[in-house]
Image (cartoon, rainbow, N blue to C red):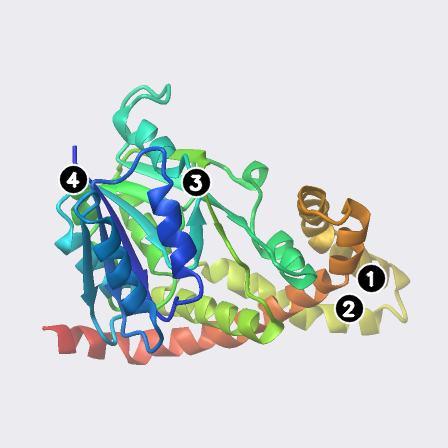
């Protein structure tokens, strides 16, 4: 069984060395690494090339530069180049825990207590914050393991492994989509009935977005991807309804005060789980749990609001593209 670790990178010179070092530190190494660069303008390609020269022939490394390729095209090309029957996927900007690959493989080899080997091993991801803002960001936007329902979990392609046959069966990553591509791929796998196992101990760590503008751009693009792929229509509709209805309810609260109390309670419920996760993350950080929590706590409502606004702006942009531009993309591909 040949195991191929594939990744796409773009301008990751600052984070790539840590990722590459974490590959070498794996308890179980892949049989090869395939890196596809989307046209970096920094030293990413040079670092990847140096890595290939440094570790070969102990760990064969394939590197290809594909300028202008989106993430899906880069992943598909990396898998095409790979020699393995098992494809393990991660991304630039992460650091792999030492047992990451070994634990993913327990699911695919059937040695993790399951009834039979899985076709997809869904790993997990945790934040690696470097500031109070990033601590709040990780707590607000990322689930904890206990928040995950294994039966419905859609793995991030930061941390997933699957059989090549499953990738082919699902129709590969959708190259017509620039963001949310892994969600569409996951849903295609589910429709095909492949066997997935959630492996929460197979973890990668990554740094959350370091500022509100960066976070806004990220969630705008995610929501635009949702609109392009027609994902989570009900979820987005509810969000518009809440943000349109809450101001009206507050105004009407001058006559019916219970409405204002309901809005306040709803706001508290909306931030309750992020604050619970923030306390847990603060406890894992140096500098004192209470102090770290208090320094980050004020960011949580603002991050929630920024993310919601970004989604409400990005989603209709994606819907417009889907209604007017998707057919043009497919015509060009013929």
Q: Residues within 10 Å of mark 1 (few under 14, many from 20)?
A: some
What residue sits right under mark 4 in the picture? 85
Q: Are marks 1 and 3 in contact (CB under 8 Å)?
A: no
Q: Are marks 1 and 4 in contact (CB under 8 Å)?
A: no
Q: Which quadrant holds the N terminus?
A: top left
Looking at the rendered structure, the secondary structure element under dot 3 is loop
Identify the mark nearer the N-term, 1 or 4: 4
* Residue 63, above or below 227: above
The quarter of the picture where residue 131 lies is bottom right
What residue sits right under mark 1 in the picture? 259
Please tell me which residue is depicted at 16% across the width and 39% down the height of the picture.
85
| Residue 259 position within the rendered picture, expressed as x and y whole percent measured from the top left | 82, 62
What residue sits right under mark 3 in the picture? 152
3D distance between C-alphas at marks 3 and 4? 25 Å
3D distance between C-alphas at marks 1 and 4? 58 Å
Identify the mark nearer the N-term, 2 or 3: 3
What residue sits right under mark 2 in the picture? 249
* Residue 228, above or below 195: below
Looking at the rendered structure, the secondary structure element under dot 1 is helix
Looking at the rendered structure, the secondary structure element under dot 2 is helix
């Amino acid at each position: 069984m040949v195991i191929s670790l594939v990744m796409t990178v773009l301008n990751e010179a600052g984070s790539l060395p840590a990722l590459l070092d974490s590959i070498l530190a794996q308890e179980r190494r892949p049989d090869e690494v395939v890196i596809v660069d989307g046209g970096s303008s920094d030293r990413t390609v040079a670092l990847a090339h140096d890595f290939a020269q440094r570790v070969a022939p102990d760990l064969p490394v394939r590197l290809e530069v594909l300028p202008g390729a989106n993430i899906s095209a880069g992943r598909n090309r990396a898998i095409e180049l790979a020699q393995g029957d098992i494809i393990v996927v991660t991304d630039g900007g992460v650091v792999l825990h030492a047992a990451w690959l070994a634990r993913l493989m327990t699911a695919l080899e059937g040695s993790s207590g399951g009834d039979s080997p899985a076709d997809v091993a869904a790993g997990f991801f945790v934040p690696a914050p470097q500031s109070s803002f990033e601590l709040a960001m990780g707590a607000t936007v990322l689930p904890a393991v206990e928040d995950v329902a294994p039966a419905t979990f859609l793995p991030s392609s930061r941390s997933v492994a699957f059989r090549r046959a499953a990738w082919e069966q699902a129709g590969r990553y959708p190259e017509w989509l620039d963001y949310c591509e892994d969600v569409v791929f996951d849903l295609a796998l589910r429709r095909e009935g492949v066997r997935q196992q959630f492996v929460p101990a197979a973890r990668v760590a990554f740094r959350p977005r370091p500022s509100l503008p960066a976070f806004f751009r990220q969630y705008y693009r995610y929501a635009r991807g949702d609109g392009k792929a027609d994902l989570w229509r009900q979820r987005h509709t509810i969000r518009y309804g809440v943000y349109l209805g809450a101001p009206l309810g507050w105004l009407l609260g001058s006559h019916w005060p219970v409405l204002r109390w309901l809005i306040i309670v709803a706001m508290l419920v909306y931030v309750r789980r992020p604050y619970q996760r923030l306390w847990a993350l603060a406890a894992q950080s140096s500098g004192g749990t209470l102090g770290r929590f208090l320094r980050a706590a004020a960011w949580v409502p603002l991050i929630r609001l920024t993310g919601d606004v970004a989604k409400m702006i990005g989603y209709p942009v994606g819907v417009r593209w889907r209604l007017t531009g998707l057919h043009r993309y497919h015509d060009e591909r013929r």
